[in-house]
Amino acid sequence: MAFREINSKMVEATVAPGQRLFSQRGAMLAYRGDVSFTPNLQGGQGGLMSMIGRRVAGEATPLMTVEGNGTVLFGHGGHHIEVIRLSGDTLYVEADRLLAFEGTLEQGTMFMGSQGGVMGLVRGQVTGQGLFTTTLKGHGAVAVMAHGGVFEIPITPQRPVHVDPQAYVAHHGDVRNKLSTALGWRDMVGRGSGEAFQLELSGSGAVYVQASEEKL
Amino acid sequence: MFRLQGSNVLAVDMTGDAVKAKNGSMVAYDGQMSFKKLTGGGEGLRGMVTRRLTGEQMTLMEVRGQGTCWFADRASEINLVSLQGDKLYVESSNLLATDGGLRTGTTFTGLRGASQGNGLFTTTIEGHGQAAIMSDGPAVVLRVSAQYPLIVDPGAYIAHQGNLRQTFQSGATFRTLLGEGGGEAFQIRFEGDGLVYVQPSERNTIAGDV
């Protein structure tokens, strides 16, 4: 396991020769051993095309490559950190919420419109997530940041889960998401319950929700 | 049925019953839920007018349905309070959710309210059921009995329940007037028998400046 939780706001990563880590630039707090940090112009994995893809998509967070032999402590802005372990499935997460992830994971960018068509685009705008999201696929661990604690809600085909778009952190598994609206005449006259837009997640997998409605 | 998931998420399991919660505080749900804003906190026209006049406005919504609903607000710590016919006094800004069956109202707090920076009125909750209140940092519950009155900083007070009398006391001396006060010029004194909830953080109050 590459990541060990020190407390709710700090993780310790073990780096060994031949194993790379990617982390958000500037998120290192301390390290032990012989570790080097290289700023990553490409903003992650893949070649030049992936880099251009991320720039265009607005999913380019400054990343750095962590290599060497030792342990590194990561934390950022006092945000809570959740370590998510992936075993072959895909995690969908916003790039600015990524703190660190193992080099064994394959990073990609997904166009939101490919799920749900026009509503997917609307969803991106409403949730403030933009039109693209970052995907991580393979075997390994990811450290994700959130405001407040994070909890996991399992999604099963019988039980779709609805999430407040502002409190949504990430999801993994075979999950379809769409924006559902509960707009009524009350919302039109300013008497809404503040829950007019919800993300509806169905399929099988899990969604991570933060205990706050604030973005990072 | 209220339960805590971690220290800052409230999970409510519902089977067709209703819960009153702060507007917009739902973070997730499964099953079927409907959300309706309660104008004037669900206290009717009279309650609505009272709240407007007293400045204890709170926007609540009624959540009704089947399944589990999760509530959270800006990562505040959540404390569960169960009421057996007694009355809970809480600031409307610290109230997250209550059982649908509990009655809410407003009451006059006198000078204490002004020193707390929360106005002269506070919200009361009455009946049988559970309520969830929020605090900045984990709250401590302090028992007040006849022999042991309790003195609390107005900025750290969040709620109290039971049969308590509260008086406002001032520790202001000539030093305070000279601007050399210790920052603890005003306190609330609780006497009687009951519980007081105190948070490990202080709101900005007039009392904190002198």
Image (cartoon, coloured by chain):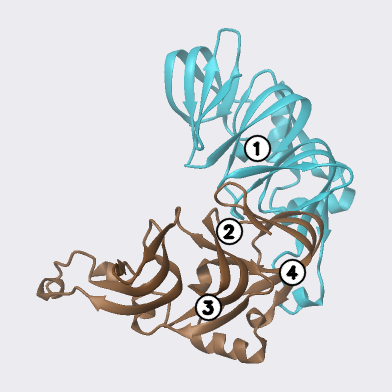
Chain colours: A cyan, B brown
Q: Pointer 1 indicates a residue of which chain? A: A
Q: Do marks 4 and 3 share a subunit?
A: yes
Q: Do marks 2 and 3 share a subunit?
A: yes
Q: Secondary structure at mark 2?
A: loop
Residue at 68% over, 74% down:
B101
Q: Quadrant of the C terminus of chain B?
A: bottom left
Give the residue pinned by disc 2: B73
Discs 2, 1 touching: Cβ within 8 Å: no
Q: Nearer the viewer, residue B26 or B101?
A: B101
Alpha carbons under labels 3 and 1: distance apart: 44 Å
Which of the 4 image quadrants contains residue A48?
A: top right
Alpha carbons under labels 2 and 4: distance apart: 19 Å
Q: Amino acid at mark 4?
A: Ala
| Above or below: residue B156 compared with residue A112 | below
Q: Which mark is residue B124?
A: 3
Discs 4, 3 touching: Cβ within 8 Å: no
Q: Check disc 1: other Cα within 10 Å, few if <14, some if 14-19, many if 20+.
A: many
Query: Closer to us: mark 3 or mark 1?
Result: 3
Residue at 31% over, 79% down:
B167
